[in-house]
Image: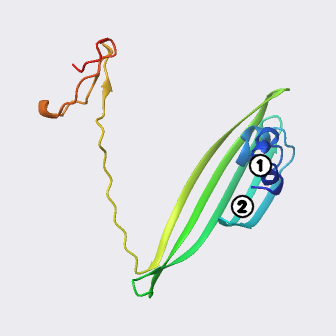
């Protein structure tokens, strides 16, 4: 987010010193003076991006920032085998950030971000969805004697081997 930051690529993390610093390095907002607001809009290969950042600076307490970005990846028609449009699927990513930064020493700034990200796929029309989720690995628990055991509740016939890190032979017990 931000023309300067995008032009510098990942290098902006080291010098984050403008209203977009919350996206790149939250410590960068610590040195900013005064309140600032910025809106950003771009069209690129991934879709349309709209963002804003608001920074409220209160020296010597620090700077508080709120930012939001919407990445609209566009719509896609959902069609049947004959090519008839059954519905439209939309893809959108939302990112909200709360930022705080302050100067700890004359040469040391610190900052923290709280980010909430949501990727949303919505359908208008006749759309269906199904899913299955599972796991093939056993869950283990550590004990005070250094032996890793499966959780209780598994029957004896279902218990995988117990791994003992102190056993040098490498055989399951």
Q: Quadrant of residue 161?
A: top left
The front one of 57 and 129 is 129
Q: Position of residue 133 (x, y in %)?
A: 33, 53
Label whose residue precedes the other's in the sequence (2 or 1): 1
* Residue at image location 79% in from the left, 42% down from the top: 11
Quadrant where the image shows the C terminus: top left
Regarding mark 2 in the picture, which secondary structure is present there?
strand
Q: Say if mark 2 contacts mark 1, CB within 8 Å.
A: no
Quadrant where the image shows the N terminus: bottom right
How packed is label 1: few (under 14 Cα within 10 Å), some, or many (20 or more)? few
Q: Position of residue 3 (x, y in %)?
A: 82, 57
Q: Is residue 157 above or below residue 56?
A: above
Q: Position of residue 61 (x, y in %)?
A: 78, 36
Q: Is residue 114 left or right of residue 148?
A: right
Q: Is residue 33 left or right of residue 67?
A: right
* Residue at image location 16% in from the left, 34% down from the top: 158
* Residue at image location 32% in from the left, 11% down from the top: 168
Q: Quadrant of residue 25?
A: top right
Regarding mark 1 in the picture, which secondary structure is present there?
helix
Q: Is residue 155 left or right of residue 52?
A: left
Question: Which color scheme did the rendering employ for the protein?
Answer: rainbow
Which label sits in the foreground, 2 or 1? Answer: 1
Q: Can you identify the residue that label 1 sits on?
A: 9
The label number, if any, that marks residue 134 in the structure image: none
Count of picture labels: 2
The front one of 23 and 111 is 23
* Residue at image location 85% in from the left, 43% down from the top: 32
Q: What's the CA distance linking mark 2 and mark 1? A: 18 Å
Q: Position of residue 67 (x, y in %)?
A: 70, 54
Q: Can you identify the residue that label 2 sits on?
A: 51
């Amino acid at each position: 987010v931000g023309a300067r930051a995008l032009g510098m690529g990942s290098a902006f993390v080291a010098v984050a010193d403008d209203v977009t610093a919350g996206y790149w390095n939250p410590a960068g907002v610590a040195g900013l003076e005064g309140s600032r607001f910025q809106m950003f809009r771009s069209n690129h290969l991934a879709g349309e991006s709209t963002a804003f950042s608001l920074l409220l600076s209160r020296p010597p307490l620090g700077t508080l920032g709120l930012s939001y970005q919407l990445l609209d990846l566009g719509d896609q028609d959902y069609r049947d085998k004959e090519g008839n449009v059954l519905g439209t699927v939309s893809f959108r990513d939302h990112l909200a950030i709360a930022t705080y930064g302050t100067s700890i020493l004359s040469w040391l700034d610190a900052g923290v971000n709280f980010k909430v990200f949501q990727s949303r796929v919505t359908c208008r029309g006749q759309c269906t969805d199904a899913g299955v989720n599972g796991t093939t690995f056993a869950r283990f628990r550590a004990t005070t004697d250094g032996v890793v055991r499966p959780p209780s509740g598994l029957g004896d016939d279902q218990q995988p081997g117990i791994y003992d890190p102190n056993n040098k032979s490498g055989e399951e017990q």
